[in-house]
Image (cartoon, grey):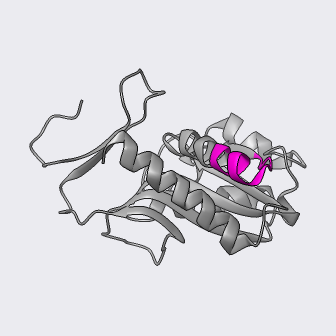
């Protein structure tokens, strides 16, 4: 995907989110670390520009909730659980749209949902992704998809966002033997 195609997809996703929610009240976007927070902020700008409404944007780090990457639990990630508004908005009243760059096995999304629920119970949780590449290991499906990209299991989808060091936005599909840049 080129930068123009990415922008077009994010604009469409922003409109779909507001349409499905029936407006912007009690709507929040939570980007899944690493690429999700940047995409969530861009979708929030689309919503602000089109609907003249400010939608809260937050980020969630799923490392402490992963089941496929054993390691030490990050005390900072779990300490926010006791905060009544860990994301800066009222979680129990909000429809939270989790935003991620690539949906693959579904394990990151499951971890993000666990992180949300540990901090409170949202009114609803939806999922928006820039790329859905298939190969799910869990029964998770995105509500809003920028582009479906069929891949082989050993291929890699590389998402570059301009805020990550300059240049243009891009999405590339890399073969298993290609070096990631």
Q: Could you say which quadrant of the image residue 138 lies in? A: bottom left
Per the image, is 62 magenta?
no
Residue at 13%, 49% (x, y): give it: 176
Q: Position of residue 152 (x, y in %)?
A: 17, 63
Up-down relation of residue 92 to residue 138 (above or below):
above
76, 145: nearer the viewer: 145
The number of discs equals: 0
41, 124: nearer the viewer: 41
Q: Could you say which quadrant of the image residue 80 lies in? A: top right
Residue at 30%, 48% (x, y): give it: 1
The residues colored magenta run: 45-56
Q: Position of residue 139 (x, y in %)?
A: 46, 78
Tell whether 59 sits left or right of 67: right
150, 3: nearer the viewer: 3
Can residue 67 be seen in this snapshot? no
Residue at 57%, 65% (x, y): give it: 127
Q: Position of residue 69 (x, y in %)?
A: 43, 50
Per the image, is 54 magenta?
yes
Residue at the left extreme?
Answer: 177
User: In which quadrant will I find the C terminus?
Assistant: top left
Q: Could you say which quadrant of the image residue 72 lies in? A: top right
Tell whether 95 sits left or right of 140: right
Q: Position of residue 47 (x, y in %)?
A: 69, 52
Residue at the top extreme?
Answer: 165
Tell whether 104 sits left or right of 29: left
Residue at 60%, 67% (x, y): give it: 16
Can residue 126 be seen in this snapshot? yes
Up-down relation of residue 151 to residue 71 (above or below):
below
């Amino acid at each position: 995907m080129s930068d123009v195609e990415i922008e077009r997809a994010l604009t469409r996703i922003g409109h779909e989110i507001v349409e499905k929610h029936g407006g912007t009240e009690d709507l929040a976007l939570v980007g899944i670390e690493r690429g999700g927070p940047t995409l969530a902020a861009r979708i929030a700008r689309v919503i602000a520009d089109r609907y003249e409404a400010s939608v809260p944007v937050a980020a969630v780090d799923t490392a402490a909730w992963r089941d496929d990457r054993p390691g030490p639990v990050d005390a900072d990630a779990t300490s926010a659980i006791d905060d009544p508004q860990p994301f800066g908005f009222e979680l129990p009243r909000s429809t939270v749209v989790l935003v991620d760059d690539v949906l693959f096995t579904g394990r990151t999304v499951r971890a993000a949902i666990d992180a949300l629920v540990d901090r409170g119970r949202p009114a609803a949780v939806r999922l928006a992704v820039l790329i859905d590449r298939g190969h799910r290991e869990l029964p998770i499906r995105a509500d809003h998809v920028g582009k479906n990209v069929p891949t082989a299991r050993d291929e890699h989808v590389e998402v570059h966002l301009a805020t990550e060091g300059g240049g243009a936005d891009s999405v590339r599909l890399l073969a298993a033997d290609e070096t990631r840049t």
